[in-house]
Image (cartoon, rainbow, N blue to C red):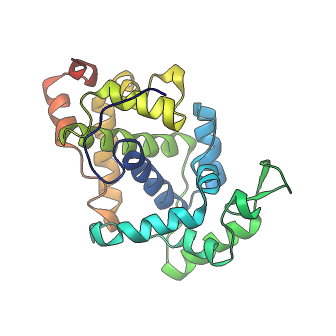
Amino acid sequence: KIPVRSANCDGFIGNRMLDAYSTVASFMVEDGASPYDIDRVLKEFGFPMGIHEVFDLAGNDIILATRKRQKQARYNEIRSIQIIDRICERGWFGQKTGRGFYKYEKNSKKCFPDPEVLSIIDDERKQKGIFVQQFSDNEILRRYMASMVNEGCKILEEKIAMRPSDIDIVKVFGYGFPKFRGGPMHYADNVGLNNILTDINEFAVGEKKSTHFWQASELLKDLVKSGANLSSLNL
């Protein structure tokens, strides 16, 4: 175990960031991306599991219960995605029931994409009149990482985490962020904070149904303006 000091907030460091990037994954799925493509992109990036595999491992009923608990505190600007509700209504809670976003072999963790899940997603899109978009692998990764880094910066702003390296430790050792990339905050410095901020502003323009979600962190904006990076905060 590697301890990291955290102040108190819902989800602390790791789960609060998990909520951000799982939310953006849900947005992408409703808007046209396949959950299986998202998971493939994340594993190619270096994660041991895709986010929908994580949902199935944790239990989709647990994920849904957490979202319902948080609903009262959420901003009205953040749209509600009911795909996981539809999956749970069928009793598909993940690995423990042998079916969730994926189908599982009996008494095995080996999983396979489920065409019925894709039908559920398609029905949700039709009911909401969603204009289906195409997401490239690059855009999937950019949206996922931008949401993660932006939430990390907000956590630093609020002094929930003491330094960016603490966030990296949490995500690498507790959440499967690929070690060779050094953690999300280190990754953001390598990519360029100006590029992360540009992505966030671009996604905010296109995400009219969730204007609050893509509000850029003030810390991120200040670092870009001053030409500094996150590693300069690791004192």
Q: Is residue 139 left or right of residue 192?
A: right
* x, y percent for residue 88: 62, 72
Q: Is residue 208 above or below residue 22?
A: below
* x, y percent for residue 52: 60, 53
Q: Is residue 23 above or below residue 209?
A: above
* x, y percent for residue 11: 36, 50
Quarter that holds the C terminus:
top left
- The answer to which image quadrant residue 78 occupies is bottom left
Residue at 36% across / 66% down in the picture? Answer: 70
Residue at 64% across / 52% down in the picture? Answer: 57
Q: Is residue 133 left or right of residue 67?
A: right
Return the residue found at the far bottom. Answer: 127
Q: How many marks?
A: 0
Q: Is residue 3 above or below residue 9?
A: above
- The answer to which image quadrant residue 137 occupies is top right
Q: Nearer the viewer, residue 54 or 141?
A: 54
Residue at 62% across / 55% down in the picture? Answer: 35
Residue at 32% across / 54% down in the picture? Answer: 10
* x, y percent for residue 33: 57, 57
- The answer to which image quadrant residue 17 occupies is top left
Q: Is residue 50 left or right of residue 183?
A: right
